Amino acid sequence: MGYAAESGPWRNFYLSGAAELRNGVKVLPSPDTAGPDMVRGMSTDLFFNFLAMKFKGTEADAAAMKYNFNIVLPDVKEKVALIVANGVVTPRIGGSVKNNVTATITINRSDLNKVSLKEASFADLLKSKAIKIVGDQNAFTSFLGKIDSFNFWFNIVEP
């Protein structure tokens, strides 16, 4: 099927799957696709939508989470409401949650970029008081524990 497929992408899918069945997936170092320029260039909307996409909402304890976070980014003068419910994270850019606020997190966007680039961790920023959390800090750290880190090399055919 791979050699007979007329579509280039479909031919690649078939041949990549056949190569995986014959040789397995080679474990190679993952390329770093999130460089400093890319992270700094992401809008706040895109950044939090990407964060929402990485949430592991299918896990049982994640599906039971019901949190309302207000995120304040003072250095760029922006606010984000993160609503976590039913295994889904819904970011609302420019808004804030009025009722049942679990926690309000104040962090500079530049510090958020450092976390994304693995130049700092939330724990380090909490210790240095670069992040202020008013409300349930444990809820926010349990939410962060459900943010996935994708494996770049994954199986195409095999489970």
Image: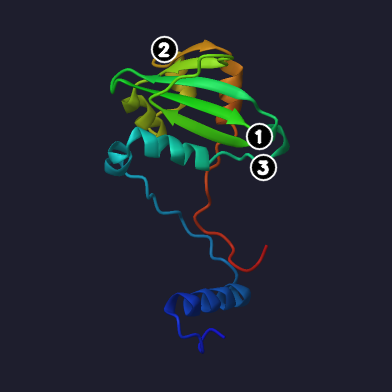
Q: Which residue is mark 2?
A: 129
Q: Callout 3: helix, strand or loop?
A: loop
Q: Which residue is mark 3?
A: 58
Residue projecting furthest to the bottom: 4
Residue sitting nearer the eye, 140 or 18: 140
Q: What's under tag 2, amino acid-wise?
A: Lys
Does residue 67 sit above or below 35 in this rendering? above
Q: Residue at x 30, y 44 (%)?
A: 38
Q: Residue at x 30, y 20 (%)?
A: 77
- Which circle's residue, 1 or 3, is located before the other in the chain? 3
Q: Which residue is mark 1?
A: 86
Does residue 18 sit above or below 152 in this rendering? below
Estimate the x, y position of residue 121 in percent, counting from the top left: 45, 27
Mark 2 closeness class: few <14, some 14–19, many ≥20 residues within 10 Å: few
> Is 50 on the left-hand or right-hand side of 154?
left
Q: Residue at x 35, y 25 (%)?
A: 111
The image quadrant that residue 76 belongs to is: top left
Marks 2 and 3 sit apart, C-alpha to C-alpha, by: 32 Å
Mark closer to the observer (1, 3) = 1
